Each structure stands twice: as structure tokens, then as C-alpha cells.
């Protein structure tokens, strides 16, 4: 980060801080997401935003080896009490928070004290992968589905109490919590987040909201902002949201499905081609690369031992390494879209959840897709119906250690991530697998339920 950039950032931040102060906003939360998938924060008073934009806010690199329970592990490049980094707010994403009226939010990029990019900055990794795609003439649009279960805030952690007994997808559940959901919509609208839909989901007390697609980094930023907005609205209503992979074992969990489409200019490459379901050869090769990499990608997209309590067959979680047209049991679902909708075609990665760091996931999916292009891959035949009944044998890894074996062997992901980030991710995954080794599903669910 050079002197000119620092000066420009300072001038921009001075203007932004004046606007925030005029709105009565006293502080800005600067967030990053660690390798365990937890959103961490440092905050600055409005009067210090200018200084933060020019010089950053100090933090320790050790957060890159934090586990879900706030214990720490270590890796070859990251770990221990030494070192210092700087958080720099992305002022283009600066957002006054509607559910926290005296606060604003901005995602942060991380640099060392000399102004060099921190090699383990997950957000900068997503930037680099999006730039790789752009160098190929490819634009990538992505969007996350956010699922959550809401419980009363004073409920014992082992026995969540749900504020509605309405059935799955039931109108009665929406009626029971209509004021709450309306406030979620109001808050997102006030923050200029365009919502596509919001509805009750399958599990008890579960809801889902989907927002418009964005560039890969923007989609990950939105995933963070949407979740924290829901958290803020929930607190105002005396409720507690859980975005964990499972809230209680042996039930449908919370997914974090990732939708993506490829573009050349104004053309959606997922349609009007000669490949399967109308996709172009470029789109087919990209998606074939994602499909091939799914066992390794699980270490990023399903990163918690709790993730594998969710990733069960016949629960629409995508437990099998296959793709299908509008198949909600396939790990990779292709959505052809309406013939009249020029932007309706996309693919959905279903086997991932919200324990994932969204920046790592968007970047890793792009890396896998570009590797598919380099290899000229084609898709296998699509799977129709439940893969269990279709006799499909390619089950995705059923545990975190099994996914980690595939991750460790992935040259594609190691090259894309770089050794410091790759090895810190692997270290956190091993440590969390050890942390929960021998624990019952109920204990795993209880330990992670309110961490995400």
C-alpha cells in the first residue's frame, strides 16, 4: 500500500466520517472472517475512521489459527504471540447498520506493517481469484443463501426453545414472526441490500433469505452483512439466531448454498450453448472442475465436525458427488432458468454451510473451476432423483478428517491459496477434528450451536 493510496484513503474516510457523524453514528465495526468461519471484529470511533483508513488498525496474526472455541493451534507460517498486522476498511462497502443505529460496518483487508498484503488474508485471496477469472475474460457472479434457526434468547443451550411451532414452509410460521421478519427486510433494505426472497424453511424455527448476486468478494461481504443484520434484528426481538450447520442432531441443518454464473460481457455462459442443459463449453468445463474438486472443497465449504452432521443423504444437503438439472439432492445443482430470463441460468453448490469462511469459499470455487477450464473437463451424465435410490456410489467425504485428506492432496487449492493460507486452514481443520474426536453428535451440536 503506497503513500498515494494512503492519502486518498484518508481523504475519502474524512468525508465518510463526517457523514456518519451527521447520522449520529459513533463507531464502525471492521470485520474479517477467520479460518474457523467466525466473524471477528475490531471497532473504531467515528473520529478515528480517517486514521484507520490511512494506517490501519492493529491486530495479531494468531487469529488465523483460532478454533471455533477460541483456543489456538499453530502452523508452519502462522501461530504464536509474535507479529502484527493492520486492518484496512474497504470504504466502498461502508454501511450504516439499521439494526444497530449508532454503528456502521465495513469489511477489512489485512496487510503487514510495511503495507504488504498479508498472505493469509482470506478476503484478498477472493480478490486474487476473481482477478484470475477476469484475466480469462470471465466475470463471475455469486450469491449465498442464508439459512438460520431462531430461538428465544434465554433458552438453555442444550434445549433451544422455538418462538413458533409452525410447519415447514408454513404460512403460520411467517405469521407467528411477521414483525420480526418484516424488521429483517426493513433493515436489509435500509442497508441497500436487495432481497430476492425470504421464507420459512424445513427445520423447526428455520428461515432463509436470499439476496441478489454480486462479484465474488461482494457476495462474501454480503454474506457477512446479512448474517450480522439478522443477528442485530434478533437481539432487538429478544431472539437468538443460529447459523450453525446443525442446531440439533438428526435434523435438517442450516445450509449456506452458493449460487454462481459465468459471464462474458453481458452473456450468461450458463445458457444458450451446445453443452448439457444448454450450458456453453466454458461453463461446462468450469462446473466440471468444481465437481471434480468437491471432496477437497469440503474442507473449506463444510469445515466443521458439525458440518458432517448436516451432510447426510436424503436431506437436500448434497451428500453425493454428482450434478443434476434442478436436483436438490445433487451436490452441484444446475438451474436452467426460464427461457425468457436472460440471467436466470446458474449453478448451486449445495454441500456447503455457514461454518465456511465465505471469502475462502468463493475464491476456492473459482480456483477449482479455472482448473477445470485448463484441463478441458466435461461433465459426467447428470443424476436424476435421489442418488441413494439411483445407486450412485460417489458419496462425498462423511467426516472432516476424510475431507482433509482430499484437501491435503489438492495441488490446485494449494497453488491458489499459497502455502501460508493453505497450511493455516489445514492446521485449524486438524485441530478442530481433534477437539471433537469422540464427542457425540449432541455434544458437537451443543458446542457449535451459538458459535456461528
Image (tube, rainbow, N blue to C red):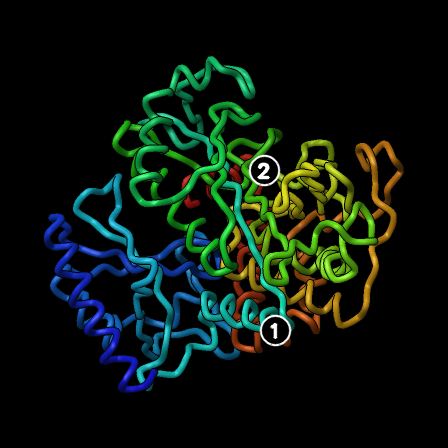
State left or right for residue 306 relative to residue 226.
right
Within-10-Å neighbours for mark 2: few <14, some 14–19, many 20+: some
Q: CA distance from mark 2 to mark 1?
A: 34 Å
Residue visible at 42% across and 55% down? 221
Q: Where 113 sits versus 284, above or below?
A: below
Q: Which mark is residue 3?
A: none
What is the x, y in percent for residue 452?
44, 45
Q: Where 264 sits versus 194, above or below?
A: below
User: Toward which corner of the image does residue 319 lie, by quadrant?
Assistant: top right
Residue closer to the observer: 69 or 7: 7
What is the x, y in percent for residue 185?
36, 33
- The reply to whether the C-beta atoms of the residues labelled 2 and 1 are less than 8 Å apart is no
**Element class at badge 2:** helix
What is the x, y in percent for residue 92?
33, 62
Q: Which comes sooner in the sequence, label 2 or label 1? A: 1
What is the x, y in percent for residue 243?
46, 40
Q: Where 398 sits versus 1, above or below?
A: above
Q: Quadrant of the N terminus?
A: bottom left
Residue visible at 45% across and 57% down? 218
Residue visible at 46% across and 13% down? 172
Dot 1 corresponds to which residue? 416
Dot 2 corresponds to which residue? 441
**Element class at badge 1:** helix
Question: Taking the image as drawn, is residue 423 in sight?
Answer: no
Instruction: Give the tally of numbered discs.
Output: 2
Amino acid at each position: 500500500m503506497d503513500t498515494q493510496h494512503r492519502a486518498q484513503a484518508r481523504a475519502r474516510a474524512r468525508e465518510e466520517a463526517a457523514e456518519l457523524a451527521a447520522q449520529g453514528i459513533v463507531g464502525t465495526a471492521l470485520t474479517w472472517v477467520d479460518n474457523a468461519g467466525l466473524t471477528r471484529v475490531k471497532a473504531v470511533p467515528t473520529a478515528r475512521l480517517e486514521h484507520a483508513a490511512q494506517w490501519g488498525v492493529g491486530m495479531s496474526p494468531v487469529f488465523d489459527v483460532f478454533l471455533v472455541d477460541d483456543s489456538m493451534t499453530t502452523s508452519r507460517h502462522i501461530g504464536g504471540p509474535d507479529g502484527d498486522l493492520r486492518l484496512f476498511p474497504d470504504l466502498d462497502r461502508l454501511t450504516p447498520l439499521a439494526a444497530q443505529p449508532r454503528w456502521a460496518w465495513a469489511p477489512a483487508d489485512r496487510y503487514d506493517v510495511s503495507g504488504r498484503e498479508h498472505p493469509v488474508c482470506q478476503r484478498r485471496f477472493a480478490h486474487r481469484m476473481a482477478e484470475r477469472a477476469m484475466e480469462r475474460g470471465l466475470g463471475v457472479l455469486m450469491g449465498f443463501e442464508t439459512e438460520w434457526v431462531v430461538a428465544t434468547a434465554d433458552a438453555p443451550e442444550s434445549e433451544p426453545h422455538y418462538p413458533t411451532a409452525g410447519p415447514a414452509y408454513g404460512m403460520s410460521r411467517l405469521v407467528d414472526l411477521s414483525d420480526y421478519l418484516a424488521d429483517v427486510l426493513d433493515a436489509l433494505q435500509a442497508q441497500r441490500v436487495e432481497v430476492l426472497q425470504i421464507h420459512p424453511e424445513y427445520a423447526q424455527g428455520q428461515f432463509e433469505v436470499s439476496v441478489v448476486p454480486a462479484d465474488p468478494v461482494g457476495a462474501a461481504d454480503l454474506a457477512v452483512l446479512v448474517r450480522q443484520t439478522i443477528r442485530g434484528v434478533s437481539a432487538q426481538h429478544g431472539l437468538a439466531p443460529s447459523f450453525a450447520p446443525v442446531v440439533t442432531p438428526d435434523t435438517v441443518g442450516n445450509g449456506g448454498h452458493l449460487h454462481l454464473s459465468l459471464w462474458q460481457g453481458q452473456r450468461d455462459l450458463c445458457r444458450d450453448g451446445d453443452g448439457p442443459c444448454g450450458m456453453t463449453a466454458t461453463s461446462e468445463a468450469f462446473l466440471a472442475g468444481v465437481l471434480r474438486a468437491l471432496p477437497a472443497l469440503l474442507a473449506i465449504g463444510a469445515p466443521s465436525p458439525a458440518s458432517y452432521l448436516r451432510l447426510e443423504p436424503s436431506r437436500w444437503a448434497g451428500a453425493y458427488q454428482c450434478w443434476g438439472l434442478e436436483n436438490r439432492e445433487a451436490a452441484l445443482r444446475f438451474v436452467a432458468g426460464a427461457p425468457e430470463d436472460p440471467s436466470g441460468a446458474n449453478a448451486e453448490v449445495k454441500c456447503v454451510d455457514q461454518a465456511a469462511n465465505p471469502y475462502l469459499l468463493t475464491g476456492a470455487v473459482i480456483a477449482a473451476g479455472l482448473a477445470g477450464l485448463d484441463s478441458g473437463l466435461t461433465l459426467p451424465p447428470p443424476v436424476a432423483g435421489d442418488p441413494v435410490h439411483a445407486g450412485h456410489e460417489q458419496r462425498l467425504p462423511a467426516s472432516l478428517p476424510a475431507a482433509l485428506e482430499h484437501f491435503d492432496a489438492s495441488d490446485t487449492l494449494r497453488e491458489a491459496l499459497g502455502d501460508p493460507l493453505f497450511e493455516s486452514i489445514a492446521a485449524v481443520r486438524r485441530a478442530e477434528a481433534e477437539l471433537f474426536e469422540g464427542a457425540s453428535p449432541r455434544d458437537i451440536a451443543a458446542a457449535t450451536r451459538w458459535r456461528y
